[in-house]
Image (cartoon, rainbow, N blue to C red):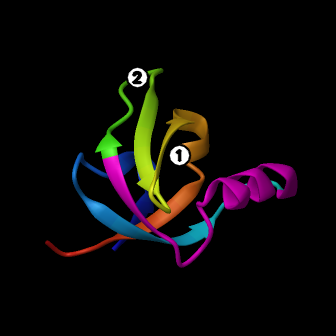
Amino acid sequence: MVLPLNYMNPDETAKVVWLASESCTRQLLIDLGFAPGEKLQCIRKPFRKSMGVYRVRGVVLALRREYANEIFVKISPE
């Protein structure tokens, strides 16, 4: 099932499927490592207005909830 990045739970891994952003935001997300096909891990789920924390390409990044809603992933089975 494909879901927005915000729906991932801590320690889950997933693969980016597509980005639903405008071109400049899309390019920023790709540059950060959230490109389609890229694997990532949720470190901390965003709560209310906080940032979520994710490991992408071996780097830990904090991402605003609004941006995470624009990244659609397929969660990997355990």
Residue located 75% across and 57% down the image: 26
Q: Are marks 1 and 2 in contact (CB under 8 Å)?
A: no
Is residue 3 or residue 11 the one in the foreground? Answer: 11
Label 1 sits on residue: 68
Q: Amino acid at mark 2?
A: Arg
Q: Quadrant of the C terminus?
A: bottom left
Q: Residue furthest left?
A: 78
Q: Residue visible at 60% across and 60% down?
A: 33
The Cα–Cα distance between marks 1 and 2, rounded to whole angstroms, is: 13 Å
x 56%, y 57%: residue: 71
Residue 19 appears left or right of 78: right
Mark 1 / mark 2, whichever is N-terminal: 2
Q: How many badges with numbers are in the image?
A: 2
The image position of residue 63, as x and y in percent, is 54, 38
Say if 15 sits above or below 21 in the image: below
Q: x and y percent of residue 45 in the render?
A: 33, 38
Q: Is residue 46 placed above or below 10 in the rendered structure?
A: above
In the displayed structure, 76 sits above or below 48; it is below
Circle 1: element type: helix
As drawn, the label of residue 26 is none
Residue 59 location (% of width, % of height): 48, 51
Q: Amino acid at mark 1?
A: Ala
Q: Is residue 40 magenta?
A: yes
First to last magenta residue range: 23-42
Q: Residue 42: where, in percent of width, then height? A: 33, 50
- The numbered disc on residue 48 is 2
Say which element carries label 2.
Answer: loop
Furthest residue in direction right, as rendered: 24
